[in-house]
Structure formats: structure tokens, C-alpha cells
Amino acid sequence: MTTIFQKLVFSCIPSAKKRTEWIMKRKSKWGAIGDDFFFQPRNLPTDTELIYIGNNVNVASDVVFVNHDIIGGMLNRKFQTKEFGYYKDKIVIGSNVAIGTNVIILPGVTIGDNVIIGAGAIVSKDLPSDSVCGGVPARVISSFDEFVEKRRMLSRKDN
């Protein structure tokens, strides 16, 4: 579990490169982190031990990883019971994944390999490999290969 002190120190690191280096020195505190990882957000996830990240993953600014919810507490008070626990689950991110700005990833989600998630998406269900996803809730909007071909065409146009 991430401490308040760790979150404060992390948020004061001025560059994304340095924040990524800070994470990589402490990657044993995470479920897993592969090679070629880049992390731009200033907020460190709370339950890093429940986050598993593959190789070549880029996380843009203001991405939020949510590994738990607070609904159990509300239900326990409403029904005057202790029957409802707090839901907590892992997030698994495959290799070759780009996560756009302001994406929210909810508990229990698996993101496949070769996935691009558009800015502002809310990922509430698993996303398949080889896809480009976006929206609220996030859904497949094209194949990874189609996107790569479009980017190649744009790159040729610019040169």
C-alpha cells in the first residue's frame, strides 16, 4: 500500500522521466512492471501491489487507477449490517499499451497486448488485444493494425 508520504514525495518530482525512474526503483511494491515503462501522472496509485504492467507501456498525464470502491461501507450503513465488504481487485495491463490522458481504469480490468486507449476513456471492462479503444465506457473503435497503418500514412505525409 502506498503511504501518504510516498504520494507527497512522488507528486513533487518535477519531470515524468524522474517520476518513472522513482517508480522503477520501487517496482517491487507493484504487482509487476515490465521493461520500457513510462509514467507521466503526478498521482501515485494507492494500491500499487494490485497493478500489473507489461513491457513497453506508456501512461499519459492524469490517468487514474482505481483498485477498490467504497460502496460496501454505504450498503453496511444503509442495511445496518457488516455483510458487505470493500471490493478490491487487480488491474492487468499487457505489453505495447498506450493509455491516453485522463483515462480512468476500474478494478478487475485486464487490458490486452497492443492496445491504445484514447484520452478520457473509462475502462470498466476488459479490452481485447490488438485494439484501439475509447469512450465512456471504453469500447473497441478500430483494430491496432488499422491504427498503425493510418499513423504510417500521416507520417509519410508530414515528411
Image (cartoon, rainbow, N blue to C red):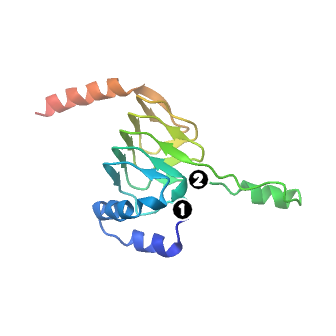
Element at label 2: loop
Q: Earlier along the polypeptide chain: callout 2 or callout 1?
A: 1
Position above or below: 27 against 7: above
Residue, far front: 28
Number of other residues with Cα within 10 Å of mark 2, as a class: few under 14, some 14 to 19, many 20 or more = many
Q: Residue 21 is drawn in which quadrant?
A: bottom left
Residue in the image at 84% along x and 55% along y: 83
Position above or below: 100 against 9: above
Residue in the image at 32% along x and 28% along y: 147
Q: How many marks?
A: 2
Q: Position of residue 110 (x, y in %)?
A: 53, 39
Front residue of 23/28: it is 28
Residue in the image at 38% along x and 55% along y: 61
Residue 46, numbered circle: 1
Q: Position of residue 158 (x, y in %)?
A: 14, 34
Position above or below: 19 against 85: below
- Which quarter of the rendered picture does the N terminus lie within? bottom right
User: Are the residues at dot 2 and dot 1 in contact (C-beta closer than 8 Å)?
Assistant: yes
Which amino acid is tagged 1?
Answer: Thr
Residue marked by disc 2? 67
Element at label 1: loop
Residue, far left: 159
Residue, far bottom: 5
Front residue of 116/158: it is 116
Classify residue 77 as left or right of residue 27. right
Which amino acid is tagged 2?
Answer: Asn
Q: Residue 94 is drawn in which quadrant?
A: top left
Residue in the image at 55% along x and 38% along y: 137
Q: Position of residue 97 (x, y in %)?
A: 38, 40
